Image (cartoon, rainbow, N blue to C red):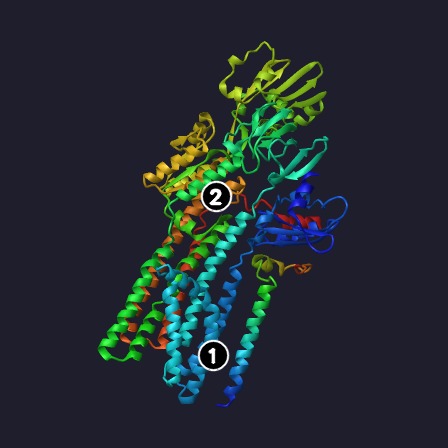
Amino acid sequence: MQQNEELRLASRPVGEDERAVELSVPDIHCGGCIRAIEKTLGDLPGITHVRVNLTARRVTVRWKEEGDGPPPFLASLEALGYPAHLHQASAESDKDPSLGPLIRALAVAGFGAGNIMFLSVAVWSGAEGTTRDIFHWISAAIALPVLIYSGRIFYVSAWRALRHGQTNMDVPITLGVLLAFGMSLYDTLQHAQHAYFDAATMLLFFLLVGRTLDHVMRARARSAVQGLARLAARGAQVEQTDGQLTYRAVEEIHPGDVLQIQAGQRIPLDGQVLTGSSDLDVSLVTGESAPCAVQPGSALQAGTLNLTGPLRVKVTAGADDSFLAKMVALMEAAEAGRSRYRRLADRASRLYAPVVHLAAALGFLGWMMAAGDLHQAVTIAVAVLIITCPCALGLAVPMVQVMAARRLFEQRVMMKDGAALERLAEIDRVVFDKTGTLTRGELELLEPDKLTPDNLDLAAAMGAMSAHPCSQALAARGTPQDERQRRSFDQVREIPGHGVEAIIGNDRFRLGRADWALEAGTDSLDGLAPDAKAGAVLSCNNRLLEAFSFSDSLRPGARQAVEALKRQGMAVEILSGDRPETASRIAAELGIEEWRSAAKPSDKVDRLAELAGQGQRVLMVGDGLNDAPALATAEVSMAPGSGADVGRNAADLVFLGDSLLAVPAATDLARRAQRLVRQNFALAIGYNALALPFAMLGYVTPLFAAVAMSSSSLLVVANALRLGAADRRLDPVPLEGDALKHHPAGQLEAAE
Amino acid sequence: MNVLFYLIPISLLLGGIALAAFFWSLKSGQYDDLNGAAERILYDEDEPPRG
């Protein structure tokens, strides 16, 4: 019911009584998935169209609007093994507006460069007299519209830089292209032998290739991260004055409204419990893994998950004023203070542009003084500008980054932009959040071998009745004979905030909080270990049978990931909001010496600032709402795809798999990519240093320029491709069974 | 040599047609899901997307 309302809010009407919605399905990964999803959903009654986008991992569903809400496609997807989230309606506009013009400019430049090159080859191989002039004229006729259309991107950027009294890489490009065209036009009029129309268009083409690659990579990763919007509380059931319930979007709920929140729903806004008691999973908000009980009067924070019982909640703060909003403010402050990292390519171009201009000016002046021939001197200056124009330099970084982004994508790590990769390569310390990052945020029974098997079985059977994490952990330890035992219960009920009570014959068993289970019993609480007080106890007629303690279970690959990071020479640290006992146990288990616990969001930010002050470059890995400001503060940050929205948006990288091994894999790849980028820079600069003297001496004919330009670009591209090759050879991170999680192709075949 | 006067315009025209075809395919969303397209070629029952 509520989900239907949410779907309606998120969908948009298309055509007559049809609605469409975009779902983000991060687990789509192959053709089999496409087929399984499109076939299964397409067969549901009422659905008119299903289209899977494998690149964006998104599904578009259209359905006929009929009486009883949308078809149950979310449930069908879930049953297929693809948990889906609603794609945020506000992110609808993530279709990049600037990519289209870039690709069109690239296509036009490629068309122009190709055709002019054909004509130029004829000239170079000996066309003479009128033929050559005609060919030059045709070249000019092709080049002019191409330069106007495709060159805009550079002219605009160059003009913007010049107006602010700066130069960037686009200034020499613009100057070179325009001068080369004007010069060639003049030469064509004079029936000269050489014209540089081909060089000008080819320059634009290569540079646009670099720009487009850069853009595509950023846009793709960003949309993938955005697409992960979870089915978070988008609204809630609001009690009206007449007692009726209506579903309203979060923005339309005001302080003072009374909400009804069922077990299993997230608390949408800060509030206070009026009636009902339950357990809350607060791990996303505070980082504490043990659930906390709430009764009437307790304050609730937005983002926590209601686990066991229904609650009536009075809203105390609106959407703009909640805990979440405070977190966002803290994050904005952190981002403003973050020392803006300047990308390698930008730093290079700052040095590069003045050098090129200077060289061209020197060439011009030198030839003016030596020969006094204006035409000759301008030709030299143009040749210098063209030959040293940053074709290879423009490709050097994006090419490697696109390769790296692709490798990361294959390992299910999304990167927001290339600068994150550059920063990641320079990391020397990794700071982990605990709950939800190093650990799964799911509880695990400690020392089950020390317990009496019968008690454990009974507890498991009772635990299977409840959604409380402790119960689930107990149920997971159960044995098949629990089935029989479960049936033998005469009566079972769950008391929210306390535990599960079962009646067998005349005996009353209770599993839950110690003070409740032993209520008025002969056993006192004092004899219990502190762990058990926090955990759960099993009692029979208020007599203690067994005490259970729990700890967070480690995320798969956590131990190996920490080891691998240490091998890469990094310091590892835990920064947790959880209690000291839990934090220290996890630290000991993983062999991490440095850990801090009970850290509030602002403490985490302070610690990161302190580390940055010591000159350390820190990678922060965290998942929750409470980590978001820290993620924004750190030099680079990474978040699991299962984390909170805010955390994921604050992070530079997001890993979708379960395994923490994604972290060392990403750092390793970043370092290798950085090496290749440096090599590419060396190649590009080496080429320019080599070519510059020839240009200055006047030996650069259009043919020479064409050959030199393309070969340097090809060299850089070939070098970048090595990132893929090396990866295949080493294959450093086997994904722990993660890639094998789904066999939808097989599933479908079996179904057919 | 006169053949050039036909051939060059013709070649430019053909190139221009190819360019127009590319623009059309770009606009009609054929590059929106390159990975998906590579997989879909294997399936017979696939339907074209609707705008």
Q: Quadrant of residue A613?
A: top left
Nearer to us of marks 1 and 2 is 1
Q: Report in which chain the residue with disc 1 lies.
A: A
Between residue A342 and residue B43, name the one nearer to us. Answer: A342
Give coordinates of residue B23: x percent, y percent. Answer: 57, 68
Helix, strand or loop status at disc 1: helix
Give coordinates of residue A543: x percent, y percent. Answer: 60, 13
Q: Is residue A553 above or below residue A31?
A: above
- Tell me what residue is drawn at x 40 percent, y 64 percent: A159
- Tell me what residue is drawn at x 59 percent, y 49 percent: A28
Question: Label 1, on which residue?
Answer: A141
The N terminus of chain A - image quarter: top right
Between residue A606 and residue A447, name the one nearer to us. Answer: A606
Answer with left or right where residue A535 lies relative to residue A380: right
The total number of labels drawn is: 2
Give coordinates of residue B36: x percent, y percent. Answer: 59, 57
- The extreme left residue here reads A370
Residue type at numbered disc 1: Ala
Question: Label 2, on which residue?
Answer: A650
Q: Quadrant of residue A477?
A: top right
Counting residues from the start of the chain, the first of labels 1 and 2 encountered is 1
Residue type at numbered disc 2: Ala
Label 1 – label 2 distance at C-alpha: 50 Å
* Residue A489 can be seen in this image: no
Give coordinates of residue A180: x percent, y percent. Answer: 38, 74
* Few, some or many residues within 10 Å of mark 2 (<14, 14–19, 20+): many
Q: Is residue A190 above or below residue A706?
A: below
